[in-house]
Amino acid sequence: MNLAQEPDNTLLLSNYAQFLYLVGHDHDRAEECFRRAAQAEKPDAEALSLYADFLWHVRNDIWGAEERYLQAISAEPSSPYYASRYARFLWRTGGTDTCYPLESYGKVS
């Protein structure tokens, strides 16, 4: 099984994208593979979550990352794993530039 034989296989696309990103440092090709995996007919939560990490850490695309995390949660709503990945993202970014900004703890309404 390889990408030439199965060009729309989300597992192969996301694994190859991870390789390109982490080992090959070819971020443009990695993003293309992640994008193809994210656009699959049947959403794959793991591929979407990995793409979100890439967008956040490499492209600094907070909005794009958040959208992918939310898509991952929608793809597997019963999995706490993807909800926890999104929670980590919100915690680390402070939530200020996301769809759901977190209120300051010192602020009282």
Image (cartoon, rainbow, N blue to C red):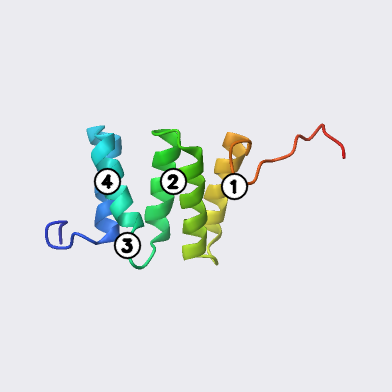
Q: Which residue is mark 4?
A: 32
For badge 2, the amino acid type reads Ala
Q: Which residue is mark 2?
A: 52
> Considering only vertical position in the picture, is 15 above or below 7?
above
User: How far apart, in angstroms, are the residues tagged by discs 4 and 1?
Assistant: 26 Å
For badge 1, the amino acid type reads Ala
Sequence-wise, the earlier of marks 4 and 1 is 4
Q: Contact, CB < 8 Å: mark 2 with mark 4? A: no
Seen at 87% across and 37% down, the residue is 108
Q: Contact, CB < 8 Å: mark 4 with mark 3? A: no
For badge 3, the amino acid type reads Ala
Q: Secondary structure at mark 4?
A: helix
Sequence-wise, the earlier of marks 3 and 2 is 3
Q: Secondary structure at mark 1?
A: helix
Location of residue 60 by image quarter = top left
Q: Nearer the viewer, mark 3 or mark 2?
A: 3
Q: Secondary structure at mark 3?
A: loop
Mark 1, Cα crowd under 10 Å, few <14 / some 14-19 / many 20+, is: some
Q: Which residue is mark 3?
A: 40
Horizontal side of residue 45 vs 33, given as left or right: right
